[in-house]
Image (cartoon, helix red, strand yellow):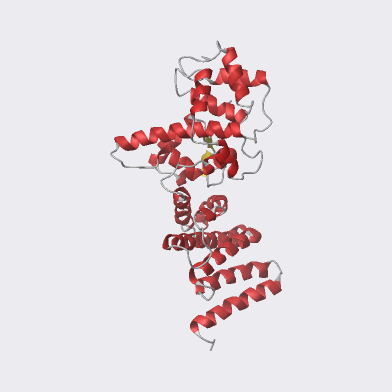
Amino acid sequence: GSSRYWAGLELDGMTLEEACLWVVARVGEGTDVPRRWAGDQEGVRKLVQNLGLLPLAIEQAAAYANQYDTMSPARYLEEQAKSSSANRDDWEQRELRSGEYPWTFVQVISMTCEKLKEIHEKATKKANGKDSGGAIGLLKKMSYLHKDGIPEQFFTDAEWVHIGVLKKYSLVHSALGGVRVHAMTQGVVRELPGLEKSEGHALRGVLTKLHAEIEKFDYDLPKTYGGGRVCVPHVKAAVRHDGLLIRHDGPTFTNAERKDKHMIAHVCNLTGMFLNRVVGSGQDALELFEQGRDLRVQVYGKDHLSVAGMCNNMAAVYDQQGKYEKAKALYQTSFTIFQNVHGPWP
């Protein structure tokens, strides 16, 4: 099936014969005209060679071609050449690690995203300007989540319609209980410009959703533990990108950044407590506690009770790990903040 090459990291490529046979089998699959590129062997050969024999890029091209009955290999290459979403010079200036996102794959994803954006803009105009974000907006959000097993409950009924569109273009695939996105697709989509209302809009939406989901967790109700476990990998994936929302470390940050810092810190704290107390993963919890503490210091200052609470949580983890000196120092910091706020302990 089409997922054969999708599941792994497809950088080694296929042989020319494999690529040609696969594309011919894929284009027209499930339609009234199966294998409709079978008679254009030269065009197919040129297309797969142009795509560097990269399986993931070839799959994207085949899925795109399947949406248009008159699409030929030559026409696909023409449209790819005209695609303007990604400029190679601009892309290289983003200082991405060499080889992480092959330029051929960037072009293919850029072309598909450009088409989805065009479809969305037409739908928005038809809806008198009401902008739902569309399939492309949803894909941008999904690029900040963990690539595997994005759960069903993360999506609204309207968003499942968009997921259907993304599946047609082979940008997402079904997974047990949800949806998965290839890590390379996520990486390119995160970097492509112009796919959201404003910079950071998609990430803010993701964090808001995760905030709401993680708050459903209750230590006294074990039946909620499953929901917490589902959220953990997605929280860890999303908070890594907090720099997109938070550009200032000092007193110059805006009110919007203040709200974002507060929300991210709260998500880090709740998830860290779950990791430590339920999952038993203290080291992962520490990383989130530290990130949350630093954000709270920036928002409220170092002598705030919320900072004391985070220090106390970190101390508890070190205590459990037998690192008593570190625990003692953090307990002392927490106690000192408490005294600074409420006065000396009676």
- At 48% from the left and 45% from the top, the residue drawn is 141
- At 63% from the left and 70% from the top, the residue drawn is 315
State the residue lying farthest toward the front.
Answer: 89
- Residue 224 in the image: state x and y as whole percent: 50, 55
Location of residue 188 (image quadrant)? top right
Position of 257 relative to 234 (above/below): below
The answer to which of 158 and 297 lies nearer the viewer is: 297
The answer to which of 123 and 7 lies nearer the viewer is: 123
State the residue lying farthest toward the top.
Answer: 39
Residue 289 in view: yes
Q: How many labels were placed on the picture?
A: 0
- Residue 227 in the image: state x and y as whole percent: 51, 52
Position of 181 relative to 57 (above/below): below
- At 51% from the left and 71% from the top, the residue drawn is 306
Residue 28 in view: no
The answer to which of 317 and 110 lies nearer the viewer is: 110
State the residue lying farthest toward the bottom.
Answer: 346
- Residue 116 in the image: state x and y as whole percent: 44, 33
Position of 131 relative to 200 (above/below): above
Instruction: Locate the N terminus by quadrant.
Output: top right
- Residue 211 in the image: state x and y as whole percent: 47, 56
